[in-house]
Structure formats: structure tokens, C-alpha cells
Image (tube, helix red, strand yellow):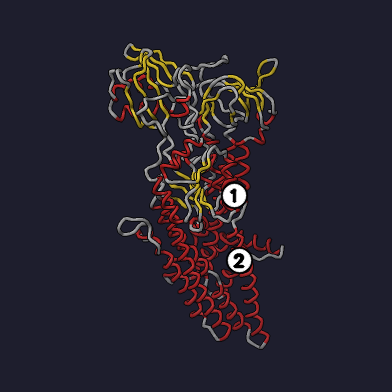
Amino acid sequence: MSLHVFLYGAGVSSTLDSPPVPTLDASARTAPRRRTRFLALPEARWALLATATFLSALPLHFADAPGWTYGPLYAIAYLAGGWEPALEGLRTLREKTLDVDLLMIVAALGAAAIGQVLDGALLIVIFATSGALEALATARTADSVRGLLDLAPATATRVTADGEESVRVNRLSVGDELLIRPGERIGADGRVLDGTSEADQATITGEPLPVLKTPGDEVFAGTLNGTGALRVRVERDPADSVIARIVTLVEEASRTKAPTQLFIEKIEQRYAVGVVAATLTVFAVPLAFGADLTGALLRAMTFMIVASPCAVVLATMPPLLSAIATAGRHGVLVKSALAMERLGEIDTAALDKTGTLTEGAPEVTAVCPATGSGLDEDALLALAAAAEHPSEHPLARAIVVAARARDLRLAPARDFTAKPGHGVTATVDGRFVTVGRPDSGLDAEADTDAGTGTGTGTGTRMDRDTDVEGGTVVRVERDGALVGTLVLADRPRADAAETAAGLTALTGTSPVLLTGDNPRAAAQVATATGITDVRASLLPEDKVTAVRELQRAGRKVLFVGDGVNDAPALAAAHAGVAMGRAGSDLALETADAVVVRDELAAIPAVVRLSRAARRLVVQNLLVAGTFITVLVLWDLLGHLPLPLGVAGHEGSTVLVGLNGLRLLRESAWRRPDGGRPRAL
């Protein structure tokens, strides 16, 4: 979830002497964005050069131009795209390890040696591009982690016996007392000793609204203080803060390889060793029995070509890349072929609440004039919106937006003041108007009954026949008399229930709701969406623990979230999906896929698409394996002409490639009747 400054009014009420509220510019509201450019990576520049020269050589080659016109271009493509994997392959060879990258370089050179320069260059370009994309993904993840560290301020104001001093955050110790001024970021995890304010801690808990902080409440490093001043006692070493632990969790999970990836690496190693050994054997045995050198070399190179894994590579990539392209057309960005494959393997879904299942922002859901107030709904809403208009608090903004949606005239407000956690007062049309928290003499239970658990403290008791479930209640008074109440709620998305049902049908298990919000708010959303397994009041590490518990039980978990606090769980899950509209930079970079248009129902759709892609991968592997087996046996047991071997090899490559492109059809995403994606 994006970071915003939530300031409930311009006035400050605090037990501390505090300076005027500072004006916060955009740089104060969000962490600096560090983003590695694609061409800043050497792998990307070499891959681009290899691709450009290869594409320049193709038309000359097919036009039967003289070899000197396109030969140097192919040579540059070989060198630009092949030198780095060749060097890395030689390094691994020194460690008595053989990888497929080195095998591809050998196959490309072997193809060039017998005149199949184009085939070799294509192999080089494919692997150079893949390496560049992998390097970009790694760099972007590192960018996001560094950006998260920027959320925590570099310095903090420490209170000492002699006054105040500015110290670097890494020099703070447990027990230090800090002064947090209005608009500042909190420098360390701790507990409030004195003062009243509101803190935007969406980065940690995912709560959509600022949380009231009073003496005894916990605060987190990197979260943004509101309009009050706080004295905070440090309770955790800065290196062990929640924000620092998020960074550690993301880094650890990113370094962890999935079992599927480990299996692929083992297969690559064995396949590479087997092909090299077989090629040497095919060359050496006939030579030992008197065959001429040229004939033995030609036979060995033919074997190298027909045994090369081009068809196997294309057996996997076109279905997955086609699925990625189709998903992208429908607003889901899947970051890699491996990510697309993982999405189809999931058998359990875990969902965040705020900003994922819900819209992530409050809106007015009910306007209730009090009996005898003389106001109708429009008049009550206009009165409240006029008083709230100068405020920047999310509840105030929601009230103003609701009034504007009804084209209501807002009278100018004078003498506006705000008290954090209580509400605002203003003079509207000569009448004294109060909007927000009830007086302390009223029944405090009303806040609990009507609240959403966001800690805003703006609830009040309503008439018995008014349904306040799932909403934060705001009391509106005029000249000290109650004239009505407004109900605001963070509503579930319109497609939340459909998405939960779709994921249940796909996995056979109801999704799990993991949220940092309180149990009551979580239960209300779960009821509305049909989710039965609810886990609330979770910090980021608790979400990771829940995901890992499911994985230890043998489940492959899909986690869907949007906030910085969701990033560790996104990284730890078998597959992670981030909501794109309000998603934090770290969540967007950590997730395997991003729902760009914020259409929650696209998640089960992309899972179905991934499963269709996996079925095509299996089909293609069978086709590729059959061709390779037949051609290799033909070359070993008989005499396979080189042109026929190349035709068979390229034919199988084209066949599996075309089969994989089936997922580019519109019907791959939705049925012709407009329904959900169909299975292929």
C-alpha cells in the first residue's frame, strides 16, 4: 500500500509543547525510489547488441547476400551474447561442474563449425536475453529492499537530562527516550510515554487509516507521525526493528530456491554431461575404427545439433510466455515464466484484507439524521462536509467526496480546529459544528461496537434500528446538540466474494485471510466474502509464519497482498500476487505477478491460465522428447543426413513453438460466452 500523510486537521492538541505542524512535501511522504535502469546492466547491453546484430544479419542471410556481408554480424552476435556465459561455464568447469549454458555455447560453436551459423546465433541470443532479464529481476529486488530501508529516518531526536540532541538512529539503545515531532517518521520501535497523535502505520500492519497513539501504545520505526507530538521509549535495537526484520525476511526468502528450481538444475547438469560425453563418443568411436576425420566430425556435429535442447527449451517457454502475454492484455503482469508456472501449482490461497479484499479507503455508507434535527440526509452530509473540508484526515476526505458526489453546496468553515483522535470543530453558517469522537462522558462501548478496529476513535452509539456493523461511526453535533451520524466503511471489493469462490473451486480449499487488522474487522470481511479461516492482528513476520506453516503441511501457497507489510509473505509463498493500484514498491517488486487494473477476479483467471500453460508444456515436452529420441537413434544406429537432421530438429522446434502460441488466443482467457477461462 502506498504511503500517505494523514493529518486530521491543522490544530494540535497534546500534553507536550510542540512546534507548528510542518508542511510535508512529496519526498517526506514516500521513501526515495531507487530503480535500476535496464540498460544500466552490462548483461542487458550485451544482450541488446547480440540481438541487434542477429536481426541485422537475418535479411542478408535469407536474401543470399555474400557471406562477408552478414558473417561479421553473426560473429558479433556470438561474441556479445556468448562471452559471458562461456566464461562462467569455464569457471564452473574448473569446479568439475558442467551447466547447460556452456553446453549451449558448445552447441552453437558446433553448429557454426558445420555451417549452421544461424542456428548457433539464435541459441546465443535466446540465452543472452534470458540472462539479462534475470539480472534485471535481481537488481529490481535489491532496489526495493534498499528503498524500504529509506523509510526509517537517518536521525532521531533523543531527550537527555540536558535537553535534546540529534543522533543517528543506529546509535540508539533500548531505553532511550525520543521526541517525535508532528510530521516526522518514527526512528525506532518503542512505546509512547507521553503525548497524543495518530500514526500512519500502513507500512507495517496494512491498516488503511491512521491509528490513535496515546501513552502505553506501541509504535514502529519508519511509520509516519501525524499532528501530535510524542515522547517514545525505545524498546528494540534499531537493527531488530520490524522494518529491519521485513528487509531480512525478503532477502532470505528471495535467496531460497523452490524445489522445482532445484530439480531443474539437477536435470540440466546431468543432461549437459550426457550430451557432451555422447558427442565425444560419437566422434571418437568411428574415428578409432578407421573413419575419416571429416566424416566423424560431421557425424558428431549432427549429433550435437539433433541432441541440443532447442526444442526442449521452446517446449517450455512459448506456452508460458504466451500465457504471460495473454495475462498482460487482461491487466495481470506475470514477471517470469517460472512465476507463471508456479501460479498453476498452487493448492492453497492466502489473502490480505486491506487494499486486497477491500478497497483500502473509507467511504460514506450511511447518512442518518437525528429525529427532530430538522435536517435531511443531504443537509446533514453537507454540514459535516463543510466542517471537515479543511481537514486532510482520510475520514474527512471521504465525507467531502460523498458530499461532492451528491453535488451539495459546502458553506465556508471558520475557526477550524482539530484534535487527533477526537475530531474537528468549525463554525459553519454561524453555527458551532463538531464532527468526530463523542465526549468522554458517553458510553465508550460505542466505539468498540461501531468501529472497524482501525484505532481512529471516531465511533459513537447510534439509534437501535441503525445497522453499524462493519463501519466507523462519526457523530455530528450543531451547537452542542446531536443532529445525526455518518457511517464510513472500507468496503469489500465488488469481486471479492467471486474471487474467494473461484480460488476455492481451483484449490479445493477455502482461502485463508491474513491481516494486520483486528479480529472484528477481519471477521466482517470474511463473512462478506465467504472465507472461513481468519487470522487477524498479524505483524509481517506473523504472516510469514502462517504461510510457512501451511507449506510445512505440504501446501503450495498463493499469497495476495499489496503493502510493504505483505512483502515478506509474498516472497515466502510459493507464488505471490500484488494488487497494483495502491501496491507498495516493495510488494510490487517482490511479487511474482501484479494485478495492474486491481481486478481481484483476475487472480483465479490467471491461475487457470497457468494450469493450461503447464498442460501445453507437458504436451510439448513429449513432442520434443520424441523427436530428439528418434533423430538421435537414427544418427547413432544408421546414417542421418545432415539436412534431414537439421530439418527434423528445426521442425520439432517450430511445432512445439506453434503449439505453445495457442494461449495467445482470446479464448484462452475467457470462454466465448464471456465466462471464466476455459481449460485447454
Residue shown at 31% from the left, 13% from the top: 429
Taking the spot 57% from the left edge, 14% from the top edge, the residue there is 17
Q: Is residue 477 left or right of residue 340?
A: left
Q: Residue at x 44, y 21 (%)?
A: 437
Label 1's element?
A: helix
Q: Which mark is residue 549?
A: 1
Q: Nearer the viewer, residue 21 or 284?
A: 21
Front label number (2 vs 1): 1
Query: Visible in this render: residue 45?
Result: no
Q: Position of residue 21 (x, y in %)?
A: 51, 19
x, y (%) of residue 259? 60, 59
Task: Identify the residue position indicated by label 2 in the image.
Answer: 268
Residue type of the residue flagged with mark 1: Glu
Does residue 389 sit above or below 479 in this rendering?
Answer: below
Give the residue at the far right of this rendering: 95
Q: Earlier in the sequence, mark 2 or mark 1?
A: 2
Q: State the image coordinates of residue 34 (x, y, percent, origin top left).
A: 55, 40
Q: Amino acid at mark 2?
A: Glu
